[in-house]
Structures are given as C-alpha cells and as structure tokens.
Amino acid sequence: MKKRENWSWRGAFIFAVLGSAVGLGNAWRFPYMVAQNGGGAFLIPYIFALLTAGIPLMLLEFGIGHKYMSAPPIAYRRAGKGLEMVGWWGNAASFVIITYYGVVMAWAINYVVHALNLSWGEDTTGFFLNFLRVSEGPGVLGRINIPVLISFLIGWIMVVAIVYSGVTGVGKVVMVTATMPVILLIVLAIRGFTLEGAAAGLDYYLSPNFAALSNLAVWRDAYSQVFFSLSVGMGVLIAYASYLPRDAEIANNVFIASLADAGIAFLAGLAIFSTVGYMAAQQGAAVADVAGSGGLGLAFMVYPKVINLLPGAPFFGVLFFLLLITLAIDSQFSLVEGCIGAIMDKWNLKRSTAVAAVSLPGFLIGLIFVTDGGLHWLDIVDKFVNSYGLIVVGLVECIVLGWIIGPKKIRDHVNGLSEIKVGGWFDFCVKYLTPAALIFILVYNLVIDLKVPYGGYPQWALNVGWVMVILLPVIAFILSKLKTAGEADEYMEEQN
Ligand code: PFF
C-alpha cells in the first residue's frame, strides 16, 4: 500500500483546520447574527449549539478520518458496508460551495485595488451593484464580468498551486493564511476601539436581550452558524484528519479548533461594530440602520463607507480586503482538498489528475456567478446548500454513526489517543441530541421556505435550488457505485 501523505509539522493540522473554519462566516455572518438575534444574549444559544452539535460533529469527523485513514467516501466505505455514499454526499455539497466561495474572494481581490484610491466613492451600495452590473433578476444572466473574471482566475490559480503542492504545501501555506486574519483583525479592532462612537456600536453588538431566547429563529440561527463556521458536514475535516500521524491527539484539537473559531468570530464582531458605531456617530444615524444589511452587504457596501471616513483610509481599506482574501482562501482550498482527497483515494489517482478533475469544473461552473445575474444565483445557491445541503449531511452522519457504526467505536478510537477522554455525552449527542436539533432546523426552514419564497425570487429559480439539493444524494449514490481502485479496500482486509 502506498504511504499516505502526512502533515509535515506538529501544528500543521490545527492550523489547517482553523484556516478552513475561520472564514467569511466568522467575520461577516457571526457579528451580524449576534446583532440581529439578541446581542450578547445570542452567545447562550451559540455556545449551546457549539457544545451539542459543533463539537460532537467535529469529533465524529476527526475520528472517522483518522481511524479509517481516508477522505470521506473511502473512510465511510471502510466504516461500514454501503456507507460510501455518505462521504460523497458531503463532498458533493462542498463542491457546490467551491463554485461560489471563490467568486466572493474574487470581489475582495478587486476591492483591494479599489481601496487604493477609494474608487467606490460615497454611494458604496450603488458602486457595488454597478461593479457587479447586477441584473434585475436570476432570469437575466447577461455577460461575464471581466474584472471579476480576472480576479476569479487569479484566485483559482492560487488555490490550485496550493493544493497541487500537496498536504505538505497546504501545511506550510496555512502558517500564513490562518494567522494573518487574526493579526489583521486585531489591528482593525484596536483601530475601531479608538474611534469616536465605538462604544455605541459595541453596545448594539453585545447588549443582551434575553427575551430573544424565547424565539425559535434565534436557536435555528445559532445552530446554522455553528455548523457553517466549523466547516462540519462537508467532509473537509475527515480529509484533513486522515493525514494525521497514527499517534495524533484528536480530542484536544477539537476543543482548540472550536473555541478558537468562536473566539475569532467574537473578535471580528468587536472590530466591525466598533467601526460601524463610528460611522453612525459621523452621520448622526442609529447603529441599527447602519448595520442594517448583514452578510456580504456589510462587507462590500457598509464597510467601504466606514473606510471612507477613517483617517488613513486607503491603508485600512487595503488591509480590510486583504483580511477577506486571507479569510476566504484557506476555506476555499480546504473544500477543494476534501474533494481531491476523495477522488485520489477512490481511484488511486495522481494528485495532479485529481486537482484538475475538481478545479476545472469548479472554475467553469463558477462562471455562472461571474455573470450579471451572478449575485442572485450566488444568493440562491448559498441559501439552499446551507439550509439543506450541509444540515442534511450532518444529520445523515449522526444517524449513520449513532445508529449503524456506533459512536462508541469512534469514541474508543479517540480516547485511545488523547489525554482528554471523551465521555458518554458524545454518544448521547450523536444519537439523540444533535440529530434532534438538526431535524428541528430542517423542519423550521422548510416551513418558512414553503410559505414565503426566499428573497422574493421567482419560484422557477428557487426550484433550481431544490433540484440541486435533491441531486446531491443522487450524484453521491452514483459515485459510490463506480468501481473502486483495489487499494481502497486493502485497509479493511488488514483490519479483519
Ligand atoms: N467555515 C467557513 C466559514 O466560516 O466561512 C466556510 C466553510 C469552509 C464551510 C469549509 C464549510 C467548509 F467545509
């Protein structure tokens, strides 16, 4: 059997996991979620979701990847007959994210250049919509946006170069891509604290409204956020853990990764809301109005406005969009690596072939999001893959591990390696608590999405989202039935 690639230094794995976990989700989604869902009080459901879903699923994925020494499909294949499809399902969902995550990174690359002379002017929202030439709806694709295309290509070239260099290369690159965002965030937070009006922004971000906790939507958001932020349900963590040496510690890595991810999200909130508070003070507006649009809107429409007002504007503008790029790139290549690993392990392919097999289609399909109608499609695809793709895969993982493989098998494996012992609570979570929470989110989302068309899009466009969600397991099933290279099954024979 070929020797498996390995992380080349001790910290590489945890840096790579953090690089994957800490992404746009931490910097943009988290602060916005906190502000919208009860301020400081949101930390309660968030921590609850972290303990009951995030940490158990991370343990599950690390455990499976390490025990069965393979990327998701073959890891599940080794774990039990007929389970290979579960692995492909996660990979299929992650492939969907791959196609659009790189486009957001492409905007950020463009914005670094725009920051140099603050070319977004005063009407930053108008600039953003103009820059993307956003069409009136998903039915109008229009043309490819050349500046975005160029930076999209640059982004992909960087990602391909990194994954092509193998696990050793990834392990080196993450030293920079996982630490840079933290340094940049600290700089931006310190800058933010010293601005006038910062206190009002932080007050809006953190002052707890405990009444919000009785709202089910707040709990739904907490679970979804933890899920997306920790990169679980995508197979990425399984692939990364499969490159660990045999005697690696697992449990403490899970605790470090999940707590650090949450801590960095919290830090991002401090940086963003202190600065948003400054902007509100400058304009005599309420913080809530300034922070009104969350997610990408906050990054590309609100933040440039704040940058305009800052002393030393271009410098902080460049810093800020560099932050976005360094946040996004290691999440993107982790998703790509998960798929590459899957293909390499299944068909025993050369890395270069697997890189091409994932990157080329990823780039080509991504071109949809580089058109004038791209923003609409990005919004729709992101919504469906997050509300249904990820959550369903997480649920299936829990059911398979909890009820077919048996959580104790993975727990024993993890406990055999670590000083920190994982207790029976893990079994309880994987069997009952986590699936119950995920079913709750699914049903909740379904009820809302069937009642109100998401984002006001026409039904035919939303149907594309539904079809995509349904196709994921179909594709996974087909892939799992394709012939496997002999090596993939050698492990089983060794074990039996
Ligand atoms: N965790 C990343 C973020 O917070 O932006 C996004 C992500 C990366 C999700 C990798 C899933 C994944 F497998």
Image: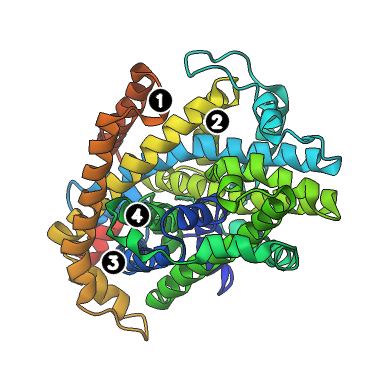
Could you tell me which secondary element the residue under label 4 belongs to?
A: helix
Q: Earlier in the sequence, mark 4 or mark 2?
A: 4
Tell me which colouring the rendered structure shows.
rainbow
Residue drawn 55% across and 42% down? 293
- Disc 1 marks a residue whose amino acid type is Gly
Which mark is drawn over residue 374? none
Q: Earlier in the sequence, mark 2 or mark 1?
A: 2
- Disc 2 marks a residue whose amino acid type is Leu
Disc 4 vs disc 2: Cβ atoms closer than 8 Å? no
User: Residue 444, position in %: x, y?
Assistant: 24, 44
Q: Disc 4 and disc 3: Cα gap in Å?
A: 16 Å
Q: Residues within 10 Å of mark 4 (few under 14, many from 20)?
A: many
Q: Which residue is mark 1?
A: 456
Residue drawn 66% across and 36% down? 107
**Which of these two is toward me, 1 or 220?**
220
Disc 4 vs disc 3: Cβ atoms closer than 8 Å? no
User: Residue 493, position in %: x, y?
Assistant: 23, 59
Q: Which residue is mark 2?
A: 360
For discs 3 and 2, the disc positioned in front in the rendered view: 3
